[in-house]
Image: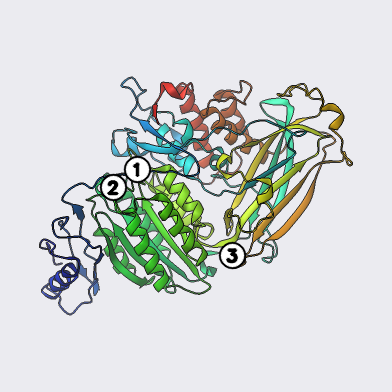
């Protein structure tokens, strides 16, 4: 093994020459080398190359990775300015609850502990950023009978909330996106039998667990499944944040572990490139065949953290590499792993979003993986994934990396339907009020449903998508909204046998024109508690709602939620459902009260 310590950087070009010279003067000069190409017009006064290591072993040259850091901190931090305002979460008061030991369910699920317990880390929230969202209101069907939204398969909010609870604190309210809690878990919907129809659509009605005078409507989608061996060839570009903010055990080391797991799944027909960004963007590993795992893993192992975050320039380079190695008909995707602290480079978020949107249209998707704490920018990571026709996940443990990048690899790589939208028209003769649980940042205007130019969510192979509505039937004593003086005579419907009418639009991955699925939802003759599936989904939704204050739960508390989840736990091969029960218990121990008691919100 040869070890090298590069000299100070003179220019971007000389860095490449210098590294090549190091390889030529090493112990094994006849072995292939991996170049690191810097893509930045910076002067020698702005950057330096830190310590790096080059290992040559068994005929495979490992990648040397320069740690790029600015000599002077650059001004400005990229701020999120669209969709919804962001909230910055300040550090909790000194009196915040101390971590509570987790027990059997988490161990059974492979989660020995959360990051704080496992790594002995402090838990400041500092400048974490979340979109400011208000829960969906109750809507009178006589006022607005049509509900329209885009599907969502992201799961990052759930694992991020788990990180907070594992560290002994309730998550900030805006960190809880209830639909991502629900969709973190799989549900046993019918599997499509014909791949020409990419997913099935299922509905179920039951009495609402927290108020038997209301109904719960579950809408479920299940994508057809594609075994990993049958996936099209993949062209993946790992875009990895190696800035100074990633210098923490729960950040860059966990990124490396996650990318190791993904690399182990690569086949000879797949290709992997690695781009890093700190003070400048660099190509650590050119696009390399998936059978050259030693070379890929060597490049990953050499990464070190240091410098500020030139995220905008890193994304530009990653897309450039993806375009140059495009596989027609294959999976072409950039996988961004970061704590979300984009503070140097692209100074205008709109320009960054425009870039991601353009590349999406060219066939290159973007997946974002969030890591760490302290300056985690959830709002930006989720927003970019939405615009990039990808998905967003938060990796808090190696077990979560296994779930996202191994167990659910096909779903998270292969898109089987894009721009998926759901619209339900409720019958005012049957339903008086409705409320969509979650999906606050996925709502669409009624006219957007038929507009194929409007971007919406994507579904991957094998993905399940679940949406829940709480309904108040006509004549129920549980109505939340007062009667209108002139509204009673307007409530008429031609068919009282239908509770509502469901429409779903989607596009095939390469298509620009949408397909339409429609089905009526029958009015129930008699309702009970429903299947264990809808009951478990209700428990997950109630947990998220409780973390957001429980405004719509009618006093249904954590103890009742935990009991509902436990009774309907069902098959739990990975222990994830048992872990949910424990997390609910932990939230109850932490008080489950006002979020203002846990964190200070600074706008």
Residue corresponding to mark 3: 509
Q: Judge whether residue 191 can be spotted in this image.
A: no
Tell me the distance, in whole angstroms, between the alpha carbons under discs 2 and 1.
8 Å
Q: Are marks 2 and 1 in contact (CB under 8 Å)?
A: yes
Q: Secondary structure at mark 1?
A: loop
Secondary element at image label 2? helix
Mark 2 neighbour class, 10 Å CA radius: few under 14, some 14 to 19, many 20 or more: many
* Residue hosting label 1: 372
Quarter of the image for the N terminus: give it.
Answer: bottom left
Residue 243 screen position, x and y as percent: 26, 50
Q: Quick one: which residue is furthest to the bottom in this view?
A: 30
Q: Which mark is residue 4?
A: none
Residue appearing at x 84%, y 34% in the figure: 429
How packed mark 1 is, by other alpha carbons closer than 10 Å (few <14, some 14-19, many 20 or more), is: many
Instruction: Say which label, 2 or 3, has the lower sequence index.
Output: 2
Distance from Cα at disc 1 to Cα at disc 3: 33 Å
- Give the residue drawn at x 56%, y 44%: 185
Q: Residue at x 34, y 50 (%)?
A: 347
Residue 443 vs residue 535, the one in the foreground: 443
**Residue annotated with mark 2:** 246
Left or right: residue 251 versus residue 28 is right
Question: In which quadrant of the rendered view does residue 314 lie?
Answer: bottom left
Q: Quadrant of residue 4?
A: bottom left
For marks 1 and 3 on the same chain, the one whose residue lies earlier in the sequence: 1
Which badge, 2 or 1, is on the more N-terminal residue?
2
Seen in the picture, residue 400 relative to 567 is either above or below; the reply is below
Label 3 neighbour load within 10 Å: few <14, some 14-19, many 20+: some
Residue 395 place in picture, x, y as percent: 41, 47
């Amino acid at each position: 093994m040869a070890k090298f310590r590069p000299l100070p950087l003179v220019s971007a070009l000389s860095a490449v020459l210098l590294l090549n010279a190091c390889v030529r003067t090493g112990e094994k000069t006849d072995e292939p080398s991996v170049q690191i190409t810097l893509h930045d017009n910076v002067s020698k006064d702005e950057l330096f190359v830190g310590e790096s290591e080059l290992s040559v072993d068994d005929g495979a040259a490992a990648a040397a990775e320069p740690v790029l850091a600015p000599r002077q901190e650059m001004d400005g931090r990229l701020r999120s300015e669209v969709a919804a305002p962001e909230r910055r979460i300040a550090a909790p008061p000194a009196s915040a609850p101390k971590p509570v030991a987790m027990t059997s369910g988490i161990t059974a699920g492979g989660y020995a502990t959360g990051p704080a317990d496992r790594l002995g880390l402090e838990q400041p929230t500092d400048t974490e950023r979340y979109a400011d969202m208000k829960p969906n209101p109750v809507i009178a069907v006589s006022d607005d009978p049509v509900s329209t939204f885009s599907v969502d398969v992201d799961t990052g909010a759930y694992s991020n909330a788990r990180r907070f609870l594992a560290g002994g604190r309730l998550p900030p309210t805006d960190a809880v996106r209830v639909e991502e809690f629900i969709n973190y878990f799989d549900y046993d919907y019918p599997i499509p039998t014909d791949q020409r129809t990419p997913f099935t659509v299922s509905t179920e009605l039951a009495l609402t667990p927290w108020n038997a005078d209301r109904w719960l409507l579950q809408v479920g989608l299940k994508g057809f499944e594609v075994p990993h061996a049958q996936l099209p060839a993949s062209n993946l570009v790992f875009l990895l944040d190696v800035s100074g903010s990633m210098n923490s055990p729960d950040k860059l080391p966990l990124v490396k572990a996650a990318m190791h797991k993904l690399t182990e799944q690569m086949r000879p027909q797949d290709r992997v490139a690695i781009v890093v960004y700190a003070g400048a963007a660099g190509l650590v590993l050119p696009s390399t065949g998936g059978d050259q795992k030693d070379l890929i893993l060597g490049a990953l192992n050499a990464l070190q953290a240091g410098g500020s975050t030139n995220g905008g320039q890193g994304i530009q380079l990653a897309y450039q590499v993806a375009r140059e190695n495009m596989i027609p008909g294959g999976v072409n995707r950039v996988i961004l792993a970061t704590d979300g602290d984009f503070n140097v480079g692209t100074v205008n978020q709109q320009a960054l979003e425009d870039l991601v949107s353009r590349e999406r249209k060219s066939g290159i998707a973007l997946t974002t993986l969030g890591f760490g704490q302290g300056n985690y920018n959830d709002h930006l990571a989720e927003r970019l994934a939405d615009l990039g026709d990808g998905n967003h996940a938060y990796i808090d443990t190696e077990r979560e990396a296994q779930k996202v990048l191994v167990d659910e690899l096909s779903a998270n790589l292969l898109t089987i339907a894009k721009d998926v939208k759901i619209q339900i028209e409720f019958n005012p003769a049957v339903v008086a009020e409705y409320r969509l649980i979650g999906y606050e940042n996925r709502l669409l205007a009624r006219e957007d449903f038929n507009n194929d130019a409007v971007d919406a969510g994507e579904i991957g192979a094998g993905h399940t998508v679940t949406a829940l509505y709480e309904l108040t039937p006509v004549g129920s004593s549980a109505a939340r909204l007062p009667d209108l003086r002139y509204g009673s005579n307007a409530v008429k419907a031609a068919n009282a046998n239908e509770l509502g009418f469901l429409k779903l639009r989607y596009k095939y991955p390469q298509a620009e024109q949408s397909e339409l699925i429609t089905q009526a939802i029958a009015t129930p003759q008699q309702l009970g508690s429903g299947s264990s599936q809808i009951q478990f989904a209700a428990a997950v939704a109630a947990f998220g709602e409780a973390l957001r204050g429980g405004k719509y739960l009618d006093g249904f508390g954590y103890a009742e939620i935990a009991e509902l989840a436990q009774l309907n736990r069902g098959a739990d091969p990975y222990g994830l459902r048992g872990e949910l029960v424990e997390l609910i218990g932990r939230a109850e121990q932490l008080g489950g009260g006002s979020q203002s008691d846990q964190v200070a919100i600074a706008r």
